[in-house]
Amino acid sequence: MAGEGAEQPTLQYEQTLMYGRYTQDLGVYAKEEAARLRESSQRRSLSDRSRSLDLLEYKGRCAKCQICTVRCQKFLISRVGEDWIFLILLGLVMALVSWGMDYCIAICLEAHKWMYGGLDSNVLLQYLAWVTYPVVLITFSAGFTQILAPQAVGSGIPEMKTILRGVVLKEYLTFKTFVAKVIGLTCALGSGMPLGKEGPFVHVASLCAALLCKFMSLFGGIYENESRNIEMLAAACAVGVGCCFAAPIGGVLFSIEVTSTFFAVRNYWRGFFAATFSAFIFRVLAVWNRDEETITALFKTRFRLDFPFDLQELPAFAVIGIASGFGGALFVYLNRLIVQFIRTQKTINRFLMKKRLLYPVLVTLIISTLTFPPGFGQFMAGKLTQKESLVTLLDNRTWAKQGIAEEFDYIGHSQAWKHPQVNVFVTLVLFIVMKFWMSALATTLPVPCGAFMPVFVIGAAFGRLVGESMAAWFPDGINTDGTIYPIVPGGYAVVGAAALAGAVTHTVSTAVIVFELTGQISHILPVMIAVILANAVAQSLQPSLYDSIIRIKKLPYLPELGWGHHEKYNIRVEDIMVRDVRYITLNCTYRDLHNVLLSGNLKTLALVETAESMILLGSIEHAQLQSLLSQQLGRSRRLEYIREQAAAEKKRLSMVSNTGSEEDSHRVSQEVRFQISTEESSFSPTRPSPLKPLKPALKRSSVAERPTELPTSPHENSGIALKNLFCGVPDPEALEDDGDVEDDMTLREITEWEEKQLDEQVNFNNCKIDPAPFQLVERTSLHKTHTIFSLLGLDHAYVTSIGRLIGVVSLKELRKAIEGSVTVKGVKVRPPLASFRDSGTSSSESEATELHKLWDRNKNMSLPREQTPSESDEKSQ
Amino acid sequence: MAGEGAEQPTLQYEQTLMYGRYTQDLGVYAKEEAARLRESSQRRSLSDRSRSLDLLEYKGRCAKCQICTVRCQKFLISRVGEDWIFLILLGLVMALVSWGMDYCIAICLEAHKWMYGGLDSNVLLQYLAWVTYPVVLITFSAGFTQILAPQAVGSGIPEMKTILRGVVLKEYLTFKTFVAKVIGLTCALGSGMPLGKEGPFVHVASLCAALLCKFMSLFGGIYENESRNIEMLAAACAVGVGCCFAAPIGGVLFSIEVTSTFFAVRNYWRGFFAATFSAFIFRVLAVWNRDEETITALFKTRFRLDFPFDLQELPAFAVIGIASGFGGALFVYLNRLIVQFIRTQKTINRFLMKKRLLYPVLVTLIISTLTFPPGFGQFMAGKLTQKESLVTLLDNRTWAKQGIAEEFDYIGHSQAWKHPQVNVFVTLVLFIVMKFWMSALATTLPVPCGAFMPVFVIGAAFGRLVGESMAAWFPDGINTDGTIYPIVPGGYAVVGAAALAGAVTHTVSTAVIVFELTGQISHILPVMIAVILANAVAQSLQPSLYDSIIRIKKLPYLPELGWGHHEKYNIRVEDIMVRDVRYITLNCTYRDLHNVLLSGNLKTLALVETAESMILLGSIEHAQLQSLLSQQLGRSRRLEYIREQAAAEKKRLSMVSNTGSEEDSHRVSQEVRFQISTEESSFSPTRPSPLKPLKPALKRSSVAERPTELPTSPHENSGIALKNLFCGVPDPEALEDDGDVEDDMTLREITEWEEKQLDEQVNFNNCKIDPAPFQLVERTSLHKTHTIFSLLGLDHAYVTSIGRLIGVVSLKELRKAIEGSVTVKGVKVRPPLASFRDSGTSSSESEATELHKLWDRNKNMSLPREQTPSESDEKSQ
């Protein structure tokens, strides 16, 4: 869920060629964040001072006016905290951004057309103009985003899905990313490549919301609440889609389907409110700009209302749905294949990594060459932009018959589909096939881009193809009741568009988007039938495009339970949990702590009462323990010890000699390891090897206590500062008692001292403990575990049996369990150990004896086991 | 959440005049349930036997055929488990039920018209026909439901909301209720009263789903899974709404908004799938019945597409929205007022309770008298049915001008609005005002009925009123760009309908329903704006109609956090939790158990390690403990004791005399109290008084051990059987050692024996313990607590601090906290104790010392407190 902000490890973006990846690297980020926080608090106090100065100056002039102003200000500030103010602002900003981008994109496309059109005397020049323009734009877009903010690459929906689940992606919602995304997207779409804008718009809207939150937090404290901000981000996603298609309802639904697992109905209105306002402004701008007379749909259709389709046409719509399902799955597969091919081909990869912009240039070159209108483009309506294609595809005239001519004004564009030598069916088929792989290829470009719109257009073309075939087959319509109702191929196009888009994204709400986009709802049943069938087919074959990207980017996200998940009801937590839990006890020594920390890389550790009782008391973060350990062995403590020693042994002679340099160096390395492991071991997937040559600066600062052996670090406090960062509170002692006591211990002394320190019991006083980590019971079903993990955004949960810790389940195990029995095509695989459950009582008996043993200490009284496990499972909710 | 089935206390329906109530009464229900289970298992084994017999007989005839059949059967059974099969069946059944009901209702209404029309010679006869018909139908409906299944009364949405939250309402989903609801609803709607069908349809669909589940569980085991069935119920709600309006998308969204707090997106497709299929079949039936040519919307409108509305009309739409918001709140208030007035007026209430059918008769009489067309009805289009009114209101001609005549065929109905003497505006106003209170009154009738449709019609009339006013004000439209686009009052009616329905139900999805109902989406922006404004106004004034009914019926439901819930982020669990938790310790005696059980009426008790450590180990149900206690003091145990005694003291003389009859009777009463409290004290709000004269049969069976004083009960085992019921497993010992040992203990002996028994330590071996009850931390915010409670469907949660139990929060406290700071109109009240939190460390210090005291036993080591409480709160998720 929300609000895990600073505590959670942040994921950092890692630049790879295809779909840059997020990886965990807390250390650097934490440092930066601390610096930033310090800086901002300084800045704020400065600005506060200057503001009060201003006020003083102002006071002199007019006291009455000032009181009034203060009151107004107070009122405004109190109002500013209201959700609806924020949502209106968000809607307004997004509408303006969206409209501005649309305007720029339109100009770019116009310019492209104009260049191409002006050079019609020379085909070579024309070709150069046709090809160079998108290449330049895409290259610029790729380069710009690469330099400014590589996080802006791609769709944004997978990342938003992850963020809304509670994971913090570093620098994903910054102003830099915003600029990169907006400009990059404008250029990418302006190039005329088959790229979409709805995914990036979700990201842009989220960026707007995040920046607005930051801005608004200057006024009121409410904007610093993390969980509220997550709610606002969810609304922003809806605004993004709603604004992109001027489809408030569809936008909200689409964003819910695409980003959420569990949706809070109480947040529903937020999305609707903001999306409606945004869509309203977006369309009003068009009216004010005299583009349109009044607010209507973006791709208005004019199908007849009284008899939109015949009942007997429904099988054709169903066919479109099923075929779209296969097509959608193929698209996702193709897209992933391309990414994986280029990633795995080492030589290509190495070459492309060096020349980062070569890949976009090549792809753009290929695509634009193939669409060159006088060339191959003439067979696939290559000169039409996406928008023009869509408008012509949704046209309510029939092309195949070419009989009825109505009073529509975009006949010009429709001409692109008619080739003198080639049948319109061939043109459509070529268009579908070519655009299919082109879109799958283009969406792998390292520019901000989505795949929704290209897929939508392809779907419309496919629907049109079916519709035209039907029209050719039944020239007078199917209805036999006297009146002739000819078949409307445009309706088929609408159905196809919704179905294919739904199949690729695994959403049903594309149906609603389609209605809002076309302004007609008359085809509701065919659209719904096709979309549901497409979803059924696609979901059983492939993950959605966004889940596919999540997998490619290895984002921490839980896969959904699939359609037919009967067997999920039979897997229990005990089948998937890790029984070897790493824990610390209340009475452990620092040495135990040290060993536990070295032995694993878990983010949190369980705190139990004693190793015998195993009663779970809470969980402690790895970093907290690291800081405990380094505090215990740290310099300030040693200095204190020296001071005490000095007082006690002032008279005694120093008997310690300075021999044994071998051991010395070993001890140094040991200490270094502690320091490094503070940062590394909890986040790097492998165990940190001692003396790993990473972060020399850090090493320096920690070894700086022996100034004779290594150069002194400029900031002696950096190690402590780092510790404080993990500890959460500044440690004033550590800062003050520096310098007045000389650190004259030899390495041998240090070794001895540390050994002694390690044998002390851990004092958990300064350590943050999570007193109620989430607990499950062995009998909890996988289905319920999945629900709870998704609902609460958990990362891991402890499995307890009557207070006793017996295992741990993390996202990893859960993911494995789900994927292990879902992705095996068709065949349902029983999960490991599941078969043991049915076959009897042996395991529960052994557990019972274990329990007896455990509880014997409680005055020889054994605790009961639940008799009907399944019931206790039901009850434990 | 799901699956709490048998464990949760079932709520039983209690018949009161207005909105029958559900109350808790486990005892009787549990008995019935056990009897039913026993019976059904017997029946099943019988049917199994007969089936195998049939097979044997069949085998002789044709072996090959049989193998084939078995294979087919197996295949079918494996398929039957699939969700989509179930959903298709559900959709099909609901479509048929819905269509059948619509057909019957139409016939009823037709008959009413025919009777009224046929008697136009005599006004008195006409009046009698007009009035008697609905009175008879409503009376029949009320009587029928009252007799067959009083649970069928009312809407059904509030109850479904409660059921989906995990509460079990007794007999709410039975076949009897289904029959009562369907027939009752048909009669109620056929009477022509202003009643709706969408709420009851939700209930009917849920009933269908529940019955189908039961039916399907004959084939496969998957249908016995509780959590799956809850998912299916959620889908059924969508089917209900979708089928009622032939609006699949709106149906799904409306049902989500109205019944869920958190919605699992993975269940989304279920609703869409079933609702689409259902809507499809529903409309196809109409086509097959030759009512319509093809599948179109129910209330098809024909507004112009190219210029649906002018930008400058938007303020008028906004006004409709705001006014509808106030109107919706007023409707809810009025409805509640009527119920409460009749409930509180003792004399009226007593009178009406005696003559249960008098109230419906009176209300129907008043309403039908007022709508009598030749009487007052002529000023309010009284002769139109709801459907006809709606069709005329959505008409796209303008009435005020009465100029443009178009080729529409229902001019006949529109005539009803035009009175020769009275302006159409007056008619509309009268219609709105009269229908408003009539609908509010009619929905309090004890018949199956909803309020959506009446409200929808009123909203449409209001919108029409505004639209006609606008049309009268701007006869040539507002647009000044040359083309004349006259104002379309029908569009206003659409907006008004959506807005008022949205305001009453607090939903946004009425917008979508409106689009699907009219088949036009051109007014999307006005509708969305009006609906959102109406929701904003209504939600800040009153709860939704369904929440209002939930409150009236006192159903166990958690209210929503309101719109502006900033202060909710500041309330913590420690402010609202009950610190005086009742608990039992692992090493407690039966006497402690007895005292704890007598002192409270909680459903579950916390089990802690020791009273000093307070480490929470789990929770035990009250009933479980009761059974433990009665087992310890029960007859079978005493008989065993006697047997032992007899063996040891065979030779000794019986020294116990039979004096002290006073003490005897006291002892009997004491034992009786134990037995009764097994059943009563956990559920009755007050402590059971000793010798409460309830359940004489039970008392008898438990005192039957002294056959000389009281008549022998026919079933001596009934007390034990009851215990076993609570215990969950049959106790074979208790049944076998009956009769061979004589119970020759005197009452004094029994007293002594029981005192001895009470001092023994409790043996929890045969007791079901929930090992992981839900835990919160003191610092958990109210907002998060609410989220967790709604997400997981919790009833209570323990508050722990590092394993130590410090408090408990139940739904009651949470509800109080939410209502305490929300329902106080306008003014935000700070919750009790909230102010203490900000003002410092005193409380946390005292807690810290307490903690130190506690943890000192762990080798004198004090456990730390978290330093930044707000962060730990964020973390504890």
Image (cartoon, coloured by chain):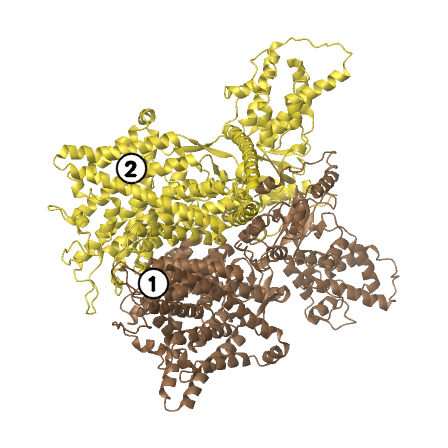
Chain colours: A yellow, B brown
Identified by mark 1, the residue type is Phe
Task: Name the chain under label 2.
Answer: A
How many discs appear?
Answer: 2
Can marks 1 and 2 be said to lie on one chain? no
Q: Looking at the image, can residue B214 be seen?
A: no
**Could you tell me which secondary element the residue under label 1 belongs to?**
helix
Residue placed farthest to the bottom in the image? B122
- What residue would you read off at disc 2? A441
- What residue would you read off at disc 1? B280
Task: Name the chain under label 1.
Answer: B
Instruction: Please tell me whether residue B279 is drawn above or below residue B438 in the rendered image.
Output: above
- Left or right, B801 with respect to B410, comes to right
- Left or right, A435 with respect to A715, comes to left
Q: Position of residue B218 (x, y in %)?
A: 46, 61
Instruction: Please tell me whether residue A420 is drawn above or below residue B350 in the rendered image.
Output: above
- Left or right, A473 with respect to B565, comes to left
**Could you tell me which secondary element the residue under label 2 belongs to?**
helix
Identified by mark 2, the residue type is Leu
